[in-house]
Image (cartoon, grey):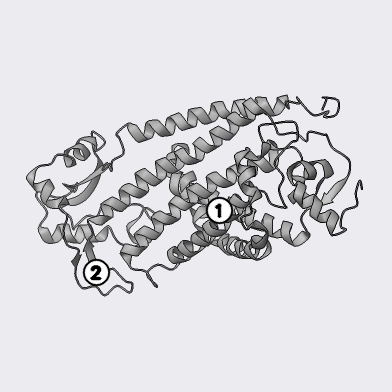
Amino acid sequence: MTDQAHPNRGRDFTGYRIGGGVAALLLVIALGWQIFEIIDGDAMTVPETQWQVSDAPEGDAGQMSATEVLIARTQLMDERFQAGPSPEAEALKFAIGPGPHLDERPLEDGGRNIAEDWLLADAETLEMVRPSERVVGTSSLPYPNAEIFERPGGRDWRLGMADTVTHLGAVIILGFSLLLAMMLALRGRVPIAKGRSGRTVKRFGFLERANHWMTATSFIVLGLTGIVIAYGDTLIRPFGADLLGALGNVATWGHALFFPPFALGVLIMILLWTWRNLPAKEDARWLAKAGGFFSDDGNNPPAKKFNAGQKLVFWSAALGGIAMILTGVTLMFPYFWADLEVMTWVMLVHAVLATVLIGIFIGHIYIGTVGMQGAIWAMWNGKVDRNWAEEHHEFWVKELHERGELKQGG
């Protein structure tokens, strides 16, 4: 078969290659930064301020009594409009009469020395951090687990959320994005080998496309708001605490508001597409040849309406989506059917699944847009080019012929 028979053979889509190269360079920088954050050894809780007794201008020097200190510390938990800072009131100095008062001052060394001292395994430290029984008391607060005073296992949970999930999750997302960018830069876009035919094949109906875009849009918003919640301190705080507060507020509400359409979309998607995404014998051959993505001659392994790669994405969305729905509902209604121990694991599972699904759907978006010529129209207007359909879904095109839905040569 000659190059004349395949007019798109050798087309490298130079603009896409350049874009992929630029994206790869930026992702290398971001990935390197994230890896440095994992190994730099500064992932510790550091106190920034200290509370100490100061003399009121008109008072006499002296120490506060235990009762006065307790009262002063209690004032710190007052409503914001009483204790400040708030738009309505200045921050109080927590004065106790005309004498000494409790004052907040920044630590000279930024709290680093204190944090490092905590790491020293002296007798008192070992006594504090030893594995112990959970201490339970009596509480009148109207929610479960309020009576738990100490939970040493919480340290493991904090390490898992603040270190393992946060940093390694970023590595998964950035690393997978880097691989796709390098693929675009080195391999180029997957072309329609025979070129556009000018004839189209209906691939998806209105209901399928509407549900796909509802689910996709909801997931993107959930992903972005989740990233703000998980990485806001690292990505947004450097631009200002006010910006982090504003985006954090939007993310908190947006994450809950876009959950219902995502859940509905996943359930409808399962009803519409499950039977076409069941495993089949041709899937093994498709995977063995990587779907023909590394060849431009159009001699791709045949597939039905959904190839093995699309089936993997579907089952990731279906099973992962159900797991995200269940864990998300549990987090939205804490302690209704799960105790504190279960809630901590639910949050970890929710976070890990989110990072994995974001990575998978980045690949799905890549293939459906810049990665493959002609693929985006399947979900844009529901129709794909005839040559594209024959090159990537040969068995499906034959099925349409057999059912009389597609005329030979038409």
Do the residues bearing badges 1 and 2 touch, measured as CB atoms within 8 Å?
no
Tell me residue 365's x, y (percent): 64, 44
Mark in front: 1 vs 2: 1
Q: Is residue 193 visible?
A: yes
The crowd level at tag 1 (other Cα within 10 Å; few <14, some 14-19, many 20+) is some
Q: Nearer the viewer, residue 163 or 319?
A: 319
Picture layout, residue 274 above or below residue 128: below
Which residue was labeled with disc 2? 147
Tell me residue 321's x, y (percent): 54, 58
At a point 50% along the width and 35% down the height, the residue shown is 175
Quadrant hosting residue 94:
bottom left
Quadrant hosting residue 215:
bottom right
Secondary structure state at the residue bearing disc 1: helix
Picture layout, residue 406 above or below residue 372: below
Please give left or right for residue 321 compared with residue 57 in the image.
right
Tell me residue 184's x, y (percent): 64, 30
At a point 47% along the width and 37% down the height, the residue shown is 239
Tell me residue 154's x, y (percent): 27, 55
- First of labels 1, 2 by sequence position: 2
Q: Nearer the viewer, residue 3 or 97?
A: 3
At a point 25% along the width and 56% down the height, the residue shown is 153
Which residue was labeled with disc 1? 316
The crowd level at tag 2 (other Cα within 10 Å; few <14, some 14-19, many 20+) is some
Q: Amino acid at mark 1?
A: Ser
Q: Nearer the viewer, residue 196 or 86?
A: 196
Q: Amino acid at mark 2?
A: Glu
Q: Which mark is residue 102?
A: none
Q: Is residue 235 visible?
A: no
Viewport quadrant of the N terminus: top right
Q: Nearer the viewer, residue 283 or 40?
A: 283
- The residue lying furthest to the left in this view is 123
At a point 63% along the width and 48% down the height, the residue shown is 283
